[in-house]
């Protein structure tokens, strides 16, 4: 597919292949301005006019239940229904086969954290598609992962296409690296497709997880103005609309989630320790939850439409679940290890956090 040193081009080909197969993808992907927004700005449209052309919809708050809103108790009930029960009738793969695209010589921990978190939260199989330099190292981290060091093969696209039908969700970006030739467009995977936004814009099976700084950069590119400092939820909803109603999880002291139709915030206490790898844990568990939420949504469409929480799309539900779980894992790990806490300490708390947050 592409030669070593042209990782950007190769990942674009993978993303094109994924969208053609209608796979859910996320989370470390972002864009330049969509053609629609660029055209509006060329015609002199102001930020106010951009807001006016986007259909206004009621916001969703997680801390109250009034009118069209949904409260924490309703959220918890929906979350429990999304989680597939463990029974003796299941076969391997039914709970999810997750693919992670990322990992190079410099960064091997990020794809490992994403992949092993996906397994520990409930996926049956977790694949890592990485470069040759990263493959042996990631294999040594855990025998539970299927590691495929093909990203720098000349036939990578053909090899990857063979695996794609087996995957339910694809996580793009953890530890992808920063080759000099793509330094301006690749930063830990978040600016992976800035040159070709049409690949993902309007592709609603997408979940993005920018932090505050990354979100601001993306917002300015898409909207042509700085985000409003006093209304962060509206910023997230507007950007999601500009991207064609993909789901955005803007990480921060409060995680803000929107698919352009609803906005929900996750403010559960986490940890004051900001060690590396926490975002990769979030990526892995979000990939699993996204698969479960889509399966639930597709199997019970008519029932969902009759319920008060029908305004919650699968991407929003998956992002909320991932935020809650990651924050709880971080809190439990910090309670034991304090300042010495690392992302590895979070992994051993996934079971306890999952049981306490979603099943009790």
Image: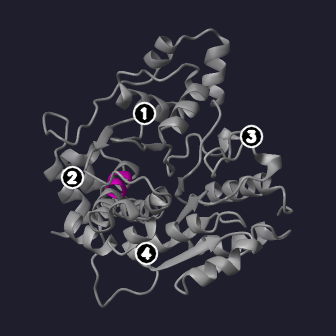
Write down the quadrant of residue 253 in the picture. Answer: top left
User: Residue at coordinates 53% horizontally, 54% vertically from top-left?
Assistant: 26
Along the line of sight, the residue nearer the viewer: 300 or 6: 6
- State the mark number for residue 75: 2
SS class, disc 3: loop
Q: Is residue 205 above or below residue 99?
A: above
User: Residue at coordinates 63% horizontally, 64% vertically from top-left?
Assistant: 101
Residue 294 place in picture, x, y as percent? 40, 59
The magenta stretch is 319-323
Can you identify the residue that label 3 sits on?
A: 184
SS class, disc 2: helix
User: Residue at coordinates 16% horizontally, 45% vertically from top-left?
Assistant: 71
Along the line of sight, the residue nearer the viewer: 330 or 256: 330
Query: Can residue 168 be seen from the camera position used here?
Result: no
Residue 246 falls within the magenta-colored stretch: no
- State the mark number for residue 123: 4
Q: Which label sits in the foreground, 4 or 3?
A: 3
Q: Main secondary structure of the magenta part?
A: helix
């Amino acid at each position: 597919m592409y030669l070593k040193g042209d990782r950007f081009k190769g990942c674009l080909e993978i993303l094109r292949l994924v969208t053609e197969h209608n796979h859910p993808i996320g989370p470390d992907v972002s864009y330049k301005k969509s053609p629609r927004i660029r055209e509006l700005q060329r015609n002199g449209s102001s930020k106010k006019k951009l807001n006016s052309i986007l259909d206004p919809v009621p916001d969703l708050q997680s801390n109250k239940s009034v009118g069209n809103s949904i409260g924490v108790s309703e959220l918890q009930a929906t979350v429990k229904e999304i989680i597939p029960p463990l029974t003796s009738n299941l076969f391997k793969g039914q709970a999810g086969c997750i693919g992670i695209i990322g990992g190079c010589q410099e960064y091997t921990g990020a794809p490992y954290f994403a992949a092993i978190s996906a397994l520990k939260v409930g996926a049956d199989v977790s694949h890592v598609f990485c470069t040759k330099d990263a493959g042996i190292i990631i294999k040594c981290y855990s025998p539970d992962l299927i590691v495929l060091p093909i990203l720098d093969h000349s036939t990578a696209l053909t090899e990857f296409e063979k695996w794609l039908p087996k995957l339910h969700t694809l996580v793009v970006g953890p530890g992808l690296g920063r080759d000099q030739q793509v330094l301006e467009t690749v930063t830990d995977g978040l600016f992976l497709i800035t040159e070709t936004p049409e690949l993902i814009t309007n592709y609603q099976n997408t979940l993005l997880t920018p932090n505050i700084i990354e979100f601001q950069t993306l917002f300015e590119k898409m909207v042509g103005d700085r985000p409003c400092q006093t209304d962060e939820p509206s910023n997230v909803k507007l950007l999601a609309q500009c991207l064609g109603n993909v789901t955005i999880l803007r990480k921060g002291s409060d995680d803000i989630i929107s698919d352009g139709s609803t906005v929900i915030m996750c403010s559960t206490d986490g940890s004051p320790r900001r060690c590396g790898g926490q975002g990769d844990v979030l990526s892995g568990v979000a990939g699993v939850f996204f698969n479960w939420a889509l399966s639930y949504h597709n199997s019970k469409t008519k029932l969902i439409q009759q319920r008060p929480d029908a305004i919650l799309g699968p991407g929003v539900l998956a992002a909320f679940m991932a935020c809650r779980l990651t924050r709880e894992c971080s809190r439990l790990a910090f309670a034991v290890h304090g300042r010495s806490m690392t992302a590895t300490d979070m992994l051993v708390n996934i079971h306890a956090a999952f049981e306490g947050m979603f099943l009790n």
